[in-house]
Image (spheres, rainbow, N blue to C red):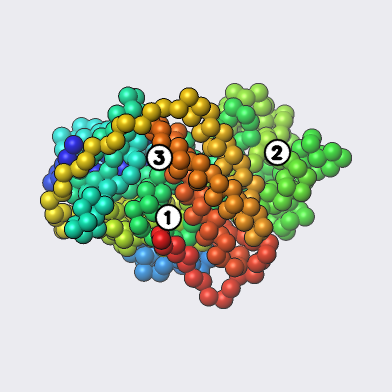
Amino acid sequence: MKFDVAIIGSGLAGLSVALHLANTHSVVVISKGELLDGASNWAQGGIAAVLDSGDSYDQHIADTLIAGGGLCDEAATRYIVEHGKEAIQWLIDQGVPFTRDDSAEMGYHLTREGGHSQRRIIHAADATGHAVQVTLEQLVRTHPNITLLEHHCAIDVINAAKLDTDSAPRCVGVYVQSVKDDKVLAISAGHTVLATGGAGKVYLYTSNPDSSTGDGIAMAWRAGCRVSNMEFIQFHPTCLYHPFAKSFLISEALRGEGAQLKLPAGAGTAAGQRFMPQHDVREELAPRDIVARSIDFEMKKRGLDHVDLDISHLPAAFIHEHFPTIQARCLEFGIDITKQAIPVVPAAHYTCGGVLTDLHGRTDLPGLYAVGETACTGLHGANRLASNSLLECLVLGRAAALDIEQHPAPPTPALPAWDESRVTDADEEVVISHNWDELRRFMWNYVSIVRTDKRLERAQHRIRLLKEEIDEYYAHFRITRDLLELRNLVEVASLIVNSALSRKESRGLHYSRDYPETLEKAVPTVLTPD
């Protein structure tokens, strides 16, 4: 199969690139599941942009730099912020139904979120990501120049220099496997775009969908691209803890209305006691990173699986009026939040680092681009400011598309077929599931919210053993989606641990008990493949 552009991932970043290019290029969009299965579709809040005369680029930039703990790239931040309004207008032109406000300058309601000094979040009620993705999905599905390969897993990008030693290094396509029939396709492309999202599934608890396995980051690393700032993983403090509840966030709005964090029954005589007053004067209304660290401390200190978030002291009618979705979801699991506390744990939420790119989305390998959460542009620094992520997807998606338009690709070589001779081993699936579980548990225990060098070194040792075992399976047995994702997860886990070990300070989302102080000079962590 041959296309001008191959896009791996179907979130906001990937679909933006596809739609900007489709009128002049043949495009294939490759998705592990359905087009709407990614994290963009789950985004509740909105998109941050300067859309009102009372706001300014400098204020948005300043808010981003403060949140980023001194580690944001100022040029990248300015570029992305200054292109925000035109990115929003493009979405409006595509038909995205943002919430209206006829009294506002642009006619749309703007809200304010933590860390922002102004109202600048444009949104579609409390399901912005879904509104945006549904709109773009319809456009992508009906465009004659866009081919969709849903339920296909990318295996690796293809470097021309690996096919022919006389060729210069360049990405010339990607191998992908059909989830439904296991057939592997070689897709030739003049330009390839990684838009696979983050890597939240490397942790036991995450707000991310199952597809967030760091595929693009791992593929770029194996292709020889640098990655940056992988130690900065943003954790949301309160995710519903239940064996059958996956990835459901309990909004911090509950704490804003008076919900209290308490120790659960497993805490013995301390059960039912609040603990945030002992950690911060702002108690439950402290910033996310502080609340997440406090919960983590109590869980590790007392050997708890979760803590409780209790809003039952407020009137039932008030709870129903303000939190109907959360109340209904908890009731599905037998939890009546008007009478009971909600069991919660912190959850991995956003990967601030990723594949190092410039402001055109270009990676170190010519012909290969990375956009969205897969990439590290320098915008997020050591901690992402709320609603800047979708903004980055839009602005850099358009920038990558423009660069692809301006730089036609040389002819692509013929690609060799995938080696299908490997056989399936009888115990493969069991071993893969065991390794997946082991990886996510020790990453949660040793490399999550609060870190020490000893814990990181333990994780590094286990990752080394797991990598050897997974590499052996990959080399000798027929591949599956689970094996591909596990291979990528262990690669990303290694990048996170190695980045964390190299940072001898606490900054933003990276908190080390061994190095609690923040150094005067902020320096990004950049890892280079051997």
Q: Which mark is residue 454?
A: none
Residue 101 position in % (x across, y down): 39, 45
Report the residue marked by disc 3. 475
Where residue 305 is drawn, which disc sits there?
Answer: 2
User: Dot 2 surroundings within 10 Å: few (below 14), some, or many (20 or more)?
Assistant: some
Which residue is more in the foreground, 430 or 444? 430
Q: Are marks 1 and 3 in contact (CB under 8 Å)?
A: no
Q: Is 359 in front, or is 50?
A: 359
Mark with earlier residue (2, 1): 2
Label 1 Cα neighbours within 10 Å, binned few <14 / some 14-19 / many ≥20:
many
> Quarter of the image containing the C terminus?
bottom left
Q: Which residue is mark 1?
A: 354
**Cα distance in 3D space between marks 2 and 3:** 37 Å
Q: Quadrant of the N terminus?
A: top left
- Residue 290 as seen in the image, left or right of residue 407: right
Nearest to the eye among marks 1 and 3: give it: 3
> Which is nearer the N-term, disc 1 or disc 3?
1
As helix, strand or loop, the secondary structure at mark 2 comes to loop
Q: Residue at x 32, y 24 (%)?
A: 181
Number of other residues with Cα within 10 Å of mark 3, as a class: few under 14, some 14 to 19, many 20 or more: few
Q: Residue at x 59, y 48 (%)?
A: 462
Q: Amino acid at mark 2?
A: Asp
Marks 2 and 1, how far apart at CA: 30 Å
Position of 168 compared to 463: left or right? left
Instruction: Name the outermost residue toward the right.
Output: 269
- Label 1 to label 3: alpha-carbon separation: 26 Å
Could you tell me residue 132's position as x and y percent? Answer: 35, 40
